[in-house]
Every structure is written in structure tokens, then in C-alpha cells.
Image (cartoon, rainbow, N blue to C red):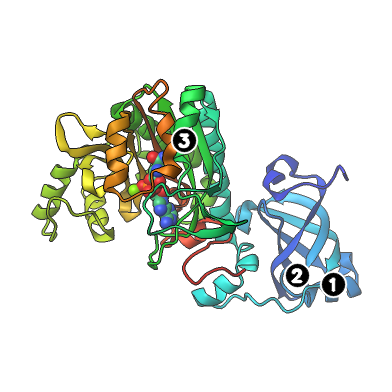
Amino acid sequence: MDKRWIYIGDAAKHCGEEVEIRGWLYNRRRKGKLLFLLVRDGTGIVQCIGDEKSLGEEEFSELDHLPLESSLIVKGVLKEEKRAPGGFEMNLLSAKVIHKAEEYPIGKKEHGIEFLMKHRHLWIRSKRQVAILRVRSRVVRSIYDFFFERGFVLFDAPILTPTSCEGTTTLFEVNYFDDKAYLTQSGQLYGEAGAMALGKIFVFGPTFRAEKSKTRKHLTEFWMVEPEVAFADLNDMIELGESLISHIVREVVSNCGEELLTLERNIDSLRRVEPPFPRMKYEEVVALLQKKGADIKWGDDFGAPEESMISESFDKPVVIHRFPKEMKAFYMKEDPEDSRLALGFDVIAPEGYGEIIGGGQRADDLNYILSQIEKHNLPQEVFKWYLDLRRYGSVPHSGFGLGLERTVAWLCGTEHIRETIPFPRMLYTLYP
Ligand code: 4AD
Ligand code: MG
């Protein structure tokens, strides 16, 4: 590797030096005898200034007509320039075109979302998308750090599964030789087996739901991190969820300043995200919503408008716990103090970004779980292995799932979840 090849992200360390940058042409303009090239390399954007004298007539003219997104290697001396985009400037000594691009389809004019989605493979090169994907990467890293620092073991759950976890209406079915399989909706049930083997584990991977509604919060393929802890109760999990969320936010705020600036994200509202979060029982939330004029009664689920109403009332994420049993999945533990309720909890993000965590304490009694499987009309045979966990050393245990893309959407302040994953999968969206 050429010692002088640097990444724009490291420009501050190389002021005054003659360096080489390898990237793509992001923008160019000419002002008299000077050429201003914006070059991006994935870590940043640098303004390069060339004049005909030092570049030579031929090179100058080639650059002056170079289509956007052509790849090139530029050499020159770096200096700090507060007024330049990115804060640095390079006086060009040479610029070698690696590939002259065809006329780039994404221009400076506003494009409709349909066009951008069709060109997602190119759209991700834009400043805003690069910023979002960098935040996503940092969120993932902070999640791994969080769990490894606390002694959790990474536990990979299968993608192809014989059962549903979160209800049978959103299952993707695939042929599995002579049998049928489903793409996993959640790694939780396997995570529970992992917790009985390893104490505390986390599953982190893609999950799938055949969501037939078109909303700004739903993908059909999304990533979820799912801790599961033996001997932990609902309260322990709420605390773990609060710590995880505030850890992620802190890491993003302190490491993604440039990206948040590009995204014009208000950081003050993120700085407030420190535990404890407000906690409310489901019934208290229903009362609050009714007071605010919502048409809702005990037993109803919260939709997007209700979630927004809830988050409006607080400036931190909100924990809602103890939901009516009927609303929730078969594996939830009944509240010993009120048999109408389940020991589940959700965390609703601020500013209307919706539910980012769902979880709770698991039913640990074999007979109760059997009755729930029957009540939910689920086939008992495929859960045989899962029931074994209640036969051999069953213990109280709890866990939750945090949706990665909704978390990234909230942190970045993106209106729609489709921008938070490189290649979103949604109803009617499978290309590219
Ligand atoms: O609330 P959910 O359905 O909970 C579970 O799947 C549990 N089995 C998790 C567990 O306890 N281990 O989903 C968890 C989170 C939601 O709060 C949301 O953030 C995200 O996953 N999520 C989605 N994100 C994007 N698109 C979708 N279609 C999503 N469905 C759920
Ligand atoms: Mg949920």
C-alpha cells in the first residue's frame, strides 16, 4: 500500500503533507482557470483545486468534463480550509482517472422516492445515506460492546425454522426439501434454550415478517438483537433495556458527530436519553390516551397514532408494561397479581419513532405454556423441544428484542425506516 494513500476521514492528521486520495467524483465546478472537484472516498468528502498550469491542458480538460461518480486517484498537498465542505482542501498536483463513468443517473435535482429506491445500489453513495449507514454500523458495534462487556455470550439462532414465534399471520413460508419451513420471526425461543445452557446470551441477526401493511415503520426483513437471561425477571429486563438504549445513544452521540450534523439531527433531545425512563402500566397508558381524546379502551393495541401520542408526552423513551394477556404472544408469563395481564413490556421511542423494544418475562410452567399453545391454536408437536426447557430445570427467565432499524431511524431522525438498512425489503420492494 502506498504510504501516501490516506482516507479523507484521517485528513486532520495529514495537514501540510503531500498525500494521495482514492475515490469518486462527487461534484465539480469551474471558476475561470480553476477547477473545484469534490472527491469522496466513503470516509468523507474533500475539495480539490486544480489549475491548468500544474495539471497540464489535457488533464485539466479531462477533469473539467468528467462525469460524476467517475473513479479517480488524486494527489496533492492537504490543508485545512474551514469554508470547504468537509473542512479540508487539496491543491492538486495530479489526478488520474481510473474509470470514466457513464452519465450518472442520480443528479442534483430532487428525485422521487420510487426512482431512488430503484437505484438504491447507487443512492447509498449519497452524503445522507452514507451518514445513516455509518450510524447503523456504530449502533451495531455499540450493541456488541454492550453485551460482551457484561459477560453475555453471542448465540446464533437459526433462520430456517419449523415454527412461528410471533403469531402465524406474518410467516414467510419456504420449501424445505419435502417439508415446509418458515423464515424466523424472532430468535427468542432458541435464545431461551441458549440461556439455559449459557446463563445469559444474546441473539443478533435478521428476522422476517410478511408485513402486508405499508407503513414507515415496517420492513419484511429487519435485524433484531435479543438478549435472554436465566433467573432474570421483568424488572431486570426493563433495566437492561434502559441501559442498552442509553449506551447506544451515548456511543452514537460521541462518535457520529459528523454524521448527525449531515443529517441535521437535534442532538439535545438525544442527550436527555439517560435512565430511568418513565414507566407506565398498560392501563395507565390507556387512561392517558383517553384523556388526550383517543378512541381507545382496555384491551386495544396501540397503533401508530397512539404511539405518537404517548411519545409526545415525554422527552425520553417510555416503558409500558403489564399488557392484557390476550394481546400478547403465547410464551408470556401471567402476572401473578392479576391473571388478566402478562408480564410483558414495550419501549416506545421519543418523537414518534414507535416501538423499539418488545419483551418480558417468559412463562416457565409447563402446564401453563401447554394451555397457551392450545389457546393460540398452535401445533404442539413442533414446540416439543421448546417444552423440554420447562421439563428440565425450568427457571424464571426473561428477555427482549430491540429492532435495529427503528432504533437507527430514531437516532438519525429519518422519516422512513427504508433508509436505515442498505437494501430494504418491504411489501412490493425486492429489487435491487
Ligand atoms: O415486539 P416484537 O414482535 O417482539 C419479539 O419478536 C420478541 N420475540 C422479542 C424477544 O422478546 N426476544 O419485536 C421486537 C422489536 C419491535 O419492538 C420492533 O422494534 C422490531 O422488533 N420490529 C420491527 N422492525 C421493523 N420492521 C418490522 N416489521 C418489525 N417488527 C418488529
Ligand atoms: Mg411488539
Query: Is residue 336 found left or right of 145 in the rendered image?
Result: left
Q: Nearer the viewer, residue 202 or 311?
A: 202
Tag in front: 2 or 3: 3
Query: Is residue 322 found left or right of 53 in the rendered image?
Result: left
> Residue flagged by tag 3: what amino acid is it?
Trp
Which residue is disc 3 drawn over?
385
Q: Quadrant of residue 86?
A: bottom right
| Residue located at (31% from left, 51% from top) | 377
Q: For the N terminus, which image quadrant?
A: top right
Gap between marks 2 and 3 measured at Cα: 68 Å
Which residue is disc 1 drawn over?
60
Residue 399 has which mark?
A: none
**Is residue 395 at least partly visible in the picture?**
yes
Residue 22 horizontal/vertical position (percent): 79, 55
> Residue flagged by tag 1: what amino acid is it?
Phe
Residue 389 horizontal/vertical position (percent): 42, 29
Which residue is disc 2 drawn over?
35
SS class, disc 3: helix
Dot 3, how many residues are within 10 Å of its Cα: few (below 14), some (14-19), or many (20+)?
A: some
Q: Quadrant of residue 27?
A: bottom right
Q: Quadrant of residue 144?
A: top right
**Is residue 317 at least partly visible in the picture?**
no
| Residue located at (71% from left, 72% from top) | 68
